[in-house]
Image (cartoon, rainbow, N blue to C red):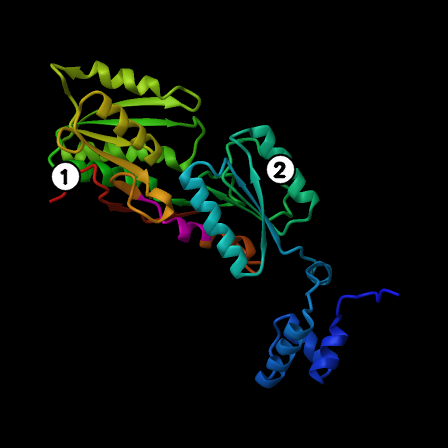
Amino acid sequence: MKKEYSSPTMKDVAKEAGIALGTVSKVVNGLPVGASYRIRVEDAIKKLNYQVNSYAQGLKANKTYTVALLIPNTKEPFFASLTYYINLALLKRKYRMLLCSTDFDSKQEQEYVTMAQQNKVDGIIGLTYNPNLIVEENTPFVAIDRSMGTNISCVASDNFAGGQLAAEKLASLGCKNVAFLRIGSSLNNEPNKRKAGFENGCLSCGLNYEMKILEDGTPYEEFDQFLIQHIQNGKLSFDGIFCVTDSLAYYILNTLKKLNQNVPEDVQIIGFDGVSFFGEQNYVCSTIVQPVSEIAEICVELLLQENMKTKPPLICLPVTYVSGGTTKEA
């Protein structure tokens, strides 16, 4: 007859380690015990291949140790990087991430929020595009890039300072006539401040500037037409371009090559986000870098702090500039 196998229990671990069941429970739940006892318990757990029942732990603590992340997609490099670092921050605290890719669909965002609440997640982190998103008051929520009310903290980069820094950098590199290119949501969110920051920087540096702003869903080819209209005698009238994202900057870089414009010799480009090839290699372009790992860490920290009576409505983190080959640094 085949012998039935049952998973080892905490009692089995206590018996193997030769210590009290209560001491094993303390080790499993991360409570302080003597070093020698902890080593004996850990050795017994390893030998028996004991698996901690996180579901039972959650019931006891009234937690699921699960956090939902609402993100537009993981195709765009910035969103992918944010997802990666939020997952790391959660794993470090022994939480699991429920990934909800919304594809910019406001209806889908609401459905994911409802699903997450039904699954009793311990909180939600959201980079959302639904201005009417409904979240239950007893569900902790931290927003990225968009303020959703005084009771929900928003974590973002200092987008205004980033736009201003881009203008100042182009001016310091000798640009005289620059363009601002943007495609994005019409919602009131933090990234919209890049435009105001860039304008302020241009005015303070005496830069001539022109803006081309498209809404989400508009074909990038409209930027091609904009640039073509500004070519006279084979030369682009702009000597500097600030793109609101690195993805757009990369597209514009390739468009300029097709138009026989040399980068950075004829025109210099600065993007925004800090995207690198394959995540770790060289930057896609000269760029304003968002501190993605810090954004992720603060989002998780704010979400899980139960004893925080009042949470800040907005936390802005500083950005930095790096050269990525599309500007003329010495």
Residues rendered magenta in the picture: 289-296
Please count the marks in the image.
Answer: 2
Q: Position of residue 184 (x, y in %)?
A: 40, 28
Q: Is residue 114 magenta?
A: no
Q: Is residue 294 magenta?
A: yes
Eye-nearest disc, 2 or 1? 1
Looking at the image, the residue that sits furthest to the right is 1
Vertical comparison of 52 with 259: above or below: below
What's the mark number on residue 112? Answer: 2
Looking at the image, the residue that sits furthest to the front is 1
Res. 301 visible in picture: no
Instruction: Choose top left, top right, bottom left or bottom right for residue 240.
Output: top left
Q: Position of residue 61 (x, y in %)?
A: 69, 62
Image position of 265 (left or right of 15): left
Q: For the C terminus, which image quadrant?
A: top left
Instruction: Choose top left, top right, bottom left or bottom right for residue 65.
Output: bottom right
Looking at the rendered structure, the secondary structure element under dot 2 is helix
Q: For the N terminus, which image quadrant?
A: bottom right
Looking at the rendered structure, the secondary structure element under dot 1 is loop
Q: Amino acid at mark 1?
A: Lys
Q: Amino acid at mark 2?
A: Tyr
Vertical comparison of 92 with 209: above or below: below
Q: Which residue sits at x=23%, y=38%?
A: 166
Q: Which residue is mark 1?
A: 328
